[in-house]
Image (cartoon, rainbow, N blue to C red):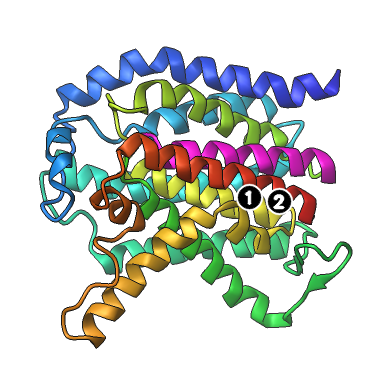
Amino acid sequence: GQMSLSVCLPVLISFLVSVFLGPVIIPFLKRLKAGQTVRDEGPKSHLKKNGTPTMGGILILSAMIVTSLFYMEDYPEIKPILLMTLGFGLIGFLDDYIKVILKRSMGLTPIQKMAGQLVVTGLFAYYLLKCTDISLAAKIPFMPGKELDLGWLNIPLLFFIVIGTVNGANFTDGLDGLAASVTVLAASFLSAAAIGTGTRIEPVTCAVAGALLGFLLFNVYPASVFMGDTGSLALGGFVAAAAYMMQLQLFIPIIGFIYLIEVVSVILQVLFFKLTGGRRLFRMAPLHHHFELGGWSETRIVAFFSVVTAILCLVALIAI
């Protein structure tokens, strides 16, 4: 039936594309010397990751694009989600490209990165307002039928939520399989919500789930490829866009709770350090490193963060 065509098939197509492309793209990234240079301030155990090819987000994006080509015509609703995913993916790609291929440790400057994020988010906001009749009012978790409508303030809120989600996803990408595991669960929630609300975006949310399942085969510990900013920024953009298409932006802190605590841990660490003249709140930020330095193995942290996300995605489904 319709369901298998718009739900199961995109997962399978996307999964197969990423599985078959993996053995092609990963050696190619290795040859490009797209090796991760692990930042010096990270945990010492991560130094062995030096030389693992990054920019594997290309794999995720390729699988998603190929799958979306089949559905674009019948499901025009997926276009703004593609815009956001590819837009943020492009910013991440430029950042990775400068860092990895041109060997400039900085990547894009913070100003360039923020400008890019504002432009992509602005295009998305414009699209929602001008080309769709989707309301920017937000459904309120646990209050069915109730919406939060802040009038013109909906627009700055959109910028805040989108950019917060994207940077949270970016900070979550720091352990083998962590960002991919957390996001495959978020994509599953978004797919279930799309089917339940009849929003017709499930071909793309299912495509992302499939792409991530394929990517995880190469990315689980010990990773043979990392997604890089190409992947993490794209996934943050995807989650934010898909949620907005269903007016579920206030559900992002639930399903993306890990993104939230990762980005908040970084902000708190910096503020605490400045205010106390050099004391630290966490052993290390983003938060997953705090657990690592507490003696947790990488795989244990990934499992723990994934279980938390899975439970919260169930809670969010109840909350719609």
43 part of magenta stretch: no
Q: Which amino acid type corresponds to the residue marked 2 in the rendered image? A: Val
**Quadrant occupied by the C terminus:** bottom right
Residue lying farthest to the front in this orientation:
295
Measured as percent of width and height from the top left, residue 282 is found at: 29, 66
**With 199 as the anchor, is 87 left or right in this view?**
left
Measured as percent of width and height from the top left, residue 215 is found at: 43, 26
Secondary structure of the residue carrying tag 2 is helix
**Quadrant occupied by the N terminus:** top right
Q: Residue at x 66, y 53 (%)?
A: 243
Nearest to the observer: residue 134 or residue 55: 55
42 to 157, vertically: above or below: above
Nearest to the observer: residue 77 or residue 317: 317
Secondary structure of the residue carrying tag 1 is helix
To which residue does mark 1 refer?
A: 312
To which residue does mark 2 refer?
A: 315
**With 199 as the anchor, is 90 left or right in this view?**
left
**With 263 as the anchor, is 257 left or right in this view?**
right
Q: Residue at x 59, y 25 (%)?
A: 67
Nearest to the observer: residue 269 or residue 205: 269
CB of mark 1 within 8 Å of CB of mark 2? Answer: yes
Q: Residue at x 47, y 55 (%)?
A: 259
Magenta part of the chain: 176-197
